[in-house]
Image (cartoon, helix red, strand yellow):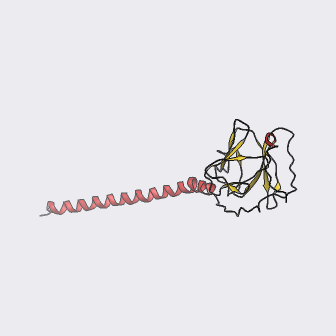
């Protein structure tokens, strides 16, 4: 009579097996959560902070125009340039040469050829394309803050640019200048 009956041994063995499986399952679950937290801190956490676009909604009623007497020093060539306007006063910055027939403008250094660090500029904000006839078209690439030319939003249709146009990529403002189109000048300051 020293042995347990067979029916008492089976439930005890089954109970130990279920407990072991539960412990292994909990350990795997905790390990996977720890691994995903480490990955989120190193990979997606850094990229989420880097990729965040500050949505900027400006009042577009002519208040963003540069002063009527602004002066920009451009190289003596037939080139095309974007002239950044810095600060609230719209002080002209260093001209950025447009040297490709098609280029992207944005915040992502790996994907855009012209890069602005302002968080209101999307990673790929806009595309500037030189057409066959030497005209330039500006496309918005689905930016969060929008692209504006002379205070008019660039929507689904690209916008034809004139030398002297004021372009806004979020809060970043630039003047478009093309020596080839200099006779085709937009009037930023209409005469009264």
- Residue 127, quarter of picture: top right
- For the question of whether residue 142 can be seen, the reply is yes
| Number of marks in the rendered image | 0
Question: Looking at the picture, does residue 157 appear above or below residue 18?
Answer: above
Left or right: 22 with respect to 183?
Answer: left
178 relative position to 29: left or right: right
Along the line of sight, which residue is nearer the eye, 60 or 79? Answer: 60
Farthest residue to the front: give it. Answer: 192
Q: Residue at x 86, y 55 (%)?
A: 70
Q: Please, is residue 114 above or below residue 52 in the view?
A: above
Q: x, y (%) of residue 136?
A: 72, 42
User: Residue at (67%, 58%) from the top-left corner?
Assistant: 120
- Of residues 116 and 7, the one nearer the viewer is 116
Q: Is residue 3 visible?
A: no
Q: Nearer the viewer, residue 20 or 118?
A: 118
Quadrant placement of the C terminus:
bottom right
Task: Return the x and y of residue 60 as percentages of the image width and height.
Answer: 71, 61
Residue 10 in percent (x, y) is at 19, 59
Question: Which residue of the protein is positioned furthest toward the left in this rendering?
Answer: 1
Q: What is the x, y in percent for residue 21?
A: 32, 58
The N terminus: image quadrant: bottom left
């Amino acid at each position: 009579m020293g042995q347990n009956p067979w029916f008492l041994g089976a439930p005890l063995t089954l109970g130990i097996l279920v407990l072991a499986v539960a412990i292994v399952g909990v350990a795997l679950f905790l390990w996977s959560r720890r691994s995903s937290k480490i990955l989120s801190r190193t990979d997606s956490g850094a990229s989420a902070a880097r990729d965040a676009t500050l949505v900027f909604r400006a009042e577009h009623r002519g208040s963003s125009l540069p002063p009527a007497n602004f002066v920009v020093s451009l190289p003596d060539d037939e080139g095309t340039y974007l002239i950044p306007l810095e600060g609230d006063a719209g002080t002209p910055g260093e001209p950025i040469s447009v040297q490709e027939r098609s280029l992207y403008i944005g915040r992502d250094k790996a994907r855009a050829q012209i890069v602005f660090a302002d968080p209101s500029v999307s990673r790929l904000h806009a595309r500037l394309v030189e057409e066959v006839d030497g005209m330039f078209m500006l496309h918005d690439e689905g930016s969060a803050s929008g692209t504006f030319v002379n205070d008019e939003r660039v929507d689904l249709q690209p916008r034809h640019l004139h030398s002297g146009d004021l372009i806004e990529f979020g809060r970043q403002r630039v003047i478009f200048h093309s020596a080839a189109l200099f006779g085709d000048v937009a009037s930023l300051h209409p005469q009264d």
